[in-house]
Amino acid sequence: MSSFTEGVFLRFDKNSDIAHITQSFFYHIDAKDSPTYIFVDAGFPTDGNSRPWVFGWLIPQYGRFTKAAVVHDSLYARPYVYRMDEGGFKVTRKSADQIFHQALLVLGCSKWLAGLIYRALRIFGGNAWRKHRKNDKGAITARITKPQTPEDN
């Protein structure tokens, strides 16, 4: 099953629902330590679990599933996943939503709730995706690999 390498640490902006990631982390897709991953860099802004206010009782904006929301926000903002030593490849909106669904399950979300959130995202997430695509600057051309850690030296 997929895995997160770290917890998510946030710094909230004053008078805003926006938070910034204070520590970079990886989300490995499909298996723990998979060579296919998403990297979320420190400083990345997130609005947590975006949802209509009427569903706030079902899934809070920040809480247990925030890590999944950060991965999803990252994929919407920059729709690339990486494969160790092969660089980045672009993902579709549907793939980004499926990765979010998988991340919810990794965090212990029930299948019915993860499915409900996924379906709502498929119905209502298009505007956010299109907004981010207006800002696309083209494909990533550099090879991106996992940064070195002190343990690697």
Image (cartoon, rainbow, N blue to C red):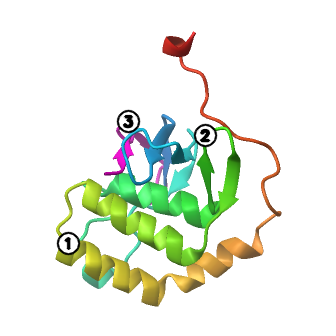
- What residue is rendered at 60% in x and 22% in y? 148
| Residue 111 visible in the displayed image | yes
Query: Which of the labelled discs sits on residue 111, or is there none?
Result: 1
> Label 2 is placed on what type of residue?
Met
Give the image location of residue 113, x and y in percent. 21, 75
Q: Mark 3 = which residue?
A: 6
Q: Is residue 64 left or right of residue 68?
A: left
Give the image location of residue 32, x and y in percent. 36, 42
Tell me if residue 85 comes above or below residue 129 in the rendering: above
Question: Within 10 Å of the Cα at label 2, are there few (<14), some (14-19), or many (20+) other Cα atoms?
Answer: some
Foreground residue, 25 or 85?
85
Give the image location of residue 77, x and y in percent. 62, 63
> Label 1 is placed on what type of residue?
Lys
Sequence-wise, which precedes: disc 3 or disc 2?
3
Query: Which of the labelled discs sits on residue 14, or is there none?
Result: none
Please report the bounds of the magenta region as a residue range: 1-18
Structural distance between the alpha carbons of marks 3 and 2: 18 Å
Give the image location of residue 51, x and y in percent. 37, 77
Q: Quadrant of the C terminus?
A: top right
- What residue is rendered at 56% in x and 38% in y? 42
Sequence-wise, which precedes: disc 1 or disc 2?
2
Q: Quadrant of residue 40?
A: top right
Callout 1: SS: helix
Tell me if residue 27 comes above or below residue 104 in the rendering: above
Tell me if residue 93 comes above or below residue 17 in the rendering: below
Q: Is residue 19 left or right of residue 1?
A: right
Question: Within 10 Å of the Cα at label 3, are there few (<14), some (14-19), or many (20+) other Cα atoms?
Answer: few
Query: Which of the labelled discs sits on residue 84, or is there none?
Result: 2
Whether 87 is among the magenta residues is no
Structural distance between the alpha carbons of marks 1 and 2: 30 Å
* Total numbered badges shown on the rendered structure: 3
Q: Disc 3 or disc 2, which is closer to the eye?
A: 2
